[in-house]
Amino acid sequence: MDNLCHPKDGASTKTGSSTSFDSATLSMLNEVHSLICQAALCEGTDRQNKVLEFKHPQQLKELLELHISDDAASKEDIMEICKKVIKYSVKTAHPYWCNQLYTGVDPYSLAASWITEALNTNQHTYEAAPVFSLVEQHMIQKMCSLVEFDDGDGMFFPGGTMGNMVGIHLARYHYDNNIKKSGMFTNQPLVIFTSQEGHYSIKTAANLLGFGLDNVVAVKTDGIGCILIQDLEEKVQLCLKENRIPCVLVATSGSTVLGAYDPLDECAVVCKKYGMWMHVDAAWGGGALVSKKHTHLCKGIKEADSVVWCLHKMLGVQLQCSAMLVKKKGFLLECNSLKADYLYQKDKFYDTSYDYGDMSIQCGRKADGFKSWLMWKAHGDLGMEARVDSAFSLARYMEERLKATEGFRLVLPDFQCTNVCFWYIPPRLRGQTESEEWWLEINQIAPRIKQCMMEEGSMMIGYQPLHCHGWKNFFRIIIANPLLTTSDIDYVISHIHDKGKDL
Ligand SMILES: Cc1ncc(COP(=O)(O)O)c(C=O)c1O
């Protein structure tokens, strides 16, 4: 038996050359690696350099020469293409990219991505990904302990959108596990509740899973964007009167625009009373869980049935890295398992409980957990906590500076998370009656300032209206990049004034 597995020394059973990576290929890879380190990482984070080199799509198409011909491109051409790709891509690790909920490049997380990309690993089974399977399970247990799921499990999914969808999918299975076999055809409509500030991925899930958009009920929020429990309960009761089934509440820990944290303890009381699944979308605000100072924002998260937490957002792990945590161990497997017998054979020679890929709704999965583990290991719990604390304190600094600077108006008196939302009012519009016309003018200011910034390549900050509060376009800056300092915040404020003062 042993002989079959291990040929004797010197006896070769393999043929052909030993590697397809000849010296020319390796030198190309080294060159690309150096280019990345220099152009994307060093130059791409230098405050003297641009965040982006904006081109309109038609111009960019011409610059990129997208056409693929019959003949192979030369190595020199490929290097030129790589340079152009970096040049015209947005540098999201630059301190003045404050546009979305992800930012920065952590060197250890990047190293982990390089390793998983080079190994081209697919994390469905232990046999294909032994190291990454153990790492993922370790990270899931660490995160379960932070949300106080004493006997939970979970896995990484590609993004918060997918995590919310899986949470809602679990809720439906919890309501009626027969749906897995028979579909939804015989059921009364199942309803998803979420606050009016909930992320649009909840509607995406309703669309994909067959709930329908009409069965997503938006619950009102208070003045700072947190779900109103009384309105939630009234809407649940209304839904019962209409013969619809209250199936799941998606509570939010850190809403996309205002960074609001729903009162999870109170949400849990309503969920228990009406037998609803409680899923927490902590995609953005879950980062607070690593900080002793800010973890209280997620108070009550242990009452949830499932939680999605994106480590690629506040914690800065390389995109994408979203953990789905489930309170009841084995429930994810029960809900999703299809036992594909070409992958999950039970007669393998090792402990097949490590072939837990059948918990997923994907077949192939990237080894996302590894990117978070290597980074966390390199910084330690204290390093991760310091990163989050520093983002929170910079956000509070920015609030104070905005309050003290003429022409800026905060959308809320205070923010719970590291989102800071504000209007810029140019001198010509200051001190006037704030009529509808005045607000229509203000509505155009943020998009025009953003246009200037992007055309110049100097900075990127998001803006949006918030219709549920009747608010016209305002800036939402996200503070999460560890490179940001108080001087950067001062510069951001003066730059906005510079771009907007003559509008
Ligand atoms: C609160 C919240 N939930 C879910 C998502 C979706 O996450 P992803 O972009 O990773 O799909 C976002 C995205 O910004 C979000 O802000």
Image (cartoon, rainbow, N blue to C red):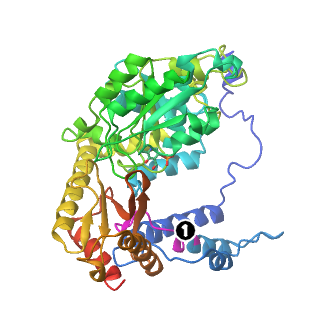
How many numbered discs, if any? 1
**In the image: residue 479, left or right of residue 470:** left
Q: Position of residue 340 (x, y in %)?
A: 70, 22
Magenta span of residues: 85-99
Q: Where does residue 279 sit, x and y in percent of width and height?
A: 43, 30
Residue 122: x, y in percent? 61, 38
Q: Residue furthest bottom?
A: 502
- The residue under the point 33% across, 70% down is 435
The residue wearing badge 1 is: 31
Q: In the figure, 283 relative to 278: above or below?
A: below
Q: Residue at x 37, y 64 (%)?
A: 474
Which residue type does callout 1 highlight? Glu
In the displayed structure image, the side of residue 339 where residue 483 appears, left or right? left
Between 139 and 229, the residue placed more toward the observer is 229
Q: Is residue 327 visible?
A: yes
Q: Is residue 89 above or below residue 139?
A: below
Q: Main secondary structure of the magenta part?
A: loop
In the rendered image, is residue 126 in sight?
no
Quadrant of the drawing holding the N terminus: top right
Residue 86 on the magenta span: yes
**Which residue is depicted at the point 41% across and 64% down?**
463
Query: Where 44 sits versus 421, above or below?
Result: below
Find out whether residue 46 is within the magenta segment. no
Residue depicted at x 65% and y 31%: 9
Residue 180 position by quadrant: top right
Element carrying mark 1: helix
Instruction: Name the one closer to the observer, 498 or 391.
Output: 498
Q: Residue 348 is drawn in which quadrant?
A: top right
Q: Is residue 384 left or right of residue 184?
A: left
